[in-house]
């Protein structure tokens, strides 16, 4: 059996609620299907499909996360990713501590043992809020581009290895293992 895996930096509940609260200040079409609150996270690495045996080995190898301190983060603005010059993802943009790049480098080094390729794109820390499937009014995009708010500061204190199961109505995330980060000194 194949398991579709990814690694996520977890957000404290209060932070997710603040982001949702800011997002909800913008009036949008009631048919917009937001990402569910329980799926809001910062993806560190999409691993892809692996066997049950490899999933267990990867889970064991990622124990190194416990050596790292909590990651300082701040949510600074809303933005979009584009495909063919059309917005296809609404996201909350994050600024993260430099330590996170060290964590990502260690993830890549560890996963190379399993022939899982390193991501070539520059890491862009964000939280996906909406996957845009239909054409949007330009007004929708402009509203989110114009909104400003004080940065939401927080410390992310855990990383999770998830299995993602694709269903017709969307994906389901199942926690494989959660790794607590050390308290800041």
Image: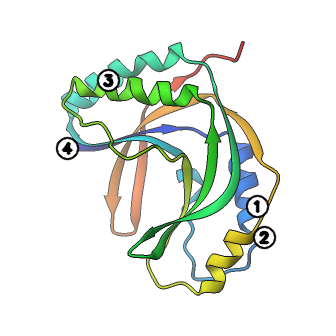
Q: Looking at the image, is mark 4 or mark 1 nearer the viewer?
A: 1
Count of all numbered marks drawn on residues in the image? 4
Examine the rendering and report whether any part of residue 29 can be seen. no
**Viewer-nearest of discs 4 and 2:** 2
How much space separates mark 1 and mark 2, taking CA atoms?
Answer: 7 Å
Image quarter hosting the N terminus: top left
- At 76% from the left and 67% from the top, the residue drawn is 147
Quadrant of the drawing holding the C terminus: top right
Circle 4 — which element?
strand
Residue 91 lies left or right of residue 13; in this view the side is left
Asked if residue 27 shows in the view, the reply is yes
Residue under pointer 1: 21
Disc 1 vs disc 3: Cβ atoms closer than 8 Å?
A: no
Place residue 143 in its image quadrant: bottom right
Q: Earlier in the sequence, mark 2 or mark 3?
A: 2
Callout 1 crowding tier (Cα within 10 Å): few <14, some 14–19, many ≥20: few
Q: x, y (%) of residue 59?
A: 34, 25
Q: Are marks 1 and 2 in contact (CB under 8 Å)?
A: yes
* Disc nearer the start of the sequence (3/4): 4
Q: Residues within 10 Å of mark 4 (few under 14, many from 20)?
A: few
Q: Residue at label 3? A: 109
Tag 2 residue:
25
């Amino acid at each position: 059996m194949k398991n579709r895996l990814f690694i996520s930096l977890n957000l404290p509940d209060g932070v997710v609620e603040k982001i949702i609260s800011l997002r909800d200040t913008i009036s949008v079409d009631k048919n917009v299907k937001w990402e569910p609150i329980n799926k809001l996270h910062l993806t560190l690495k999409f691993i892809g499909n692996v066997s049950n045996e490899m999933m267990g080995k990867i889970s064991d190898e990622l124990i190194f996360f416990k050596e790292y301190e909590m990651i300082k983060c701040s949510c600074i603005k809303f933005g979009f990713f584009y495909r063919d010059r059309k917005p296809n993802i609404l996201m909350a943009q994050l600024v993260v501590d430099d330590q996170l790049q060290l964590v990502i480098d260690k993830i890549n080094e560890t996963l190379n043992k399993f022939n899982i390729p390193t991501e070539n794109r520059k890491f862009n820390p964000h939280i996906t809020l909406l996957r845009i499937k239909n054409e949007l009014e330009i007004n929708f995009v402009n509203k989110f581009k114009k909104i400003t708010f004080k940065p939401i500061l927080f410390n992310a204190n855990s990383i999770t290895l998830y299995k993602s199961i694709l269903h017709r109505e969307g994906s389901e995330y199942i926690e494989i293992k959660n790794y607590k980060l050390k308290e800041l000194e």
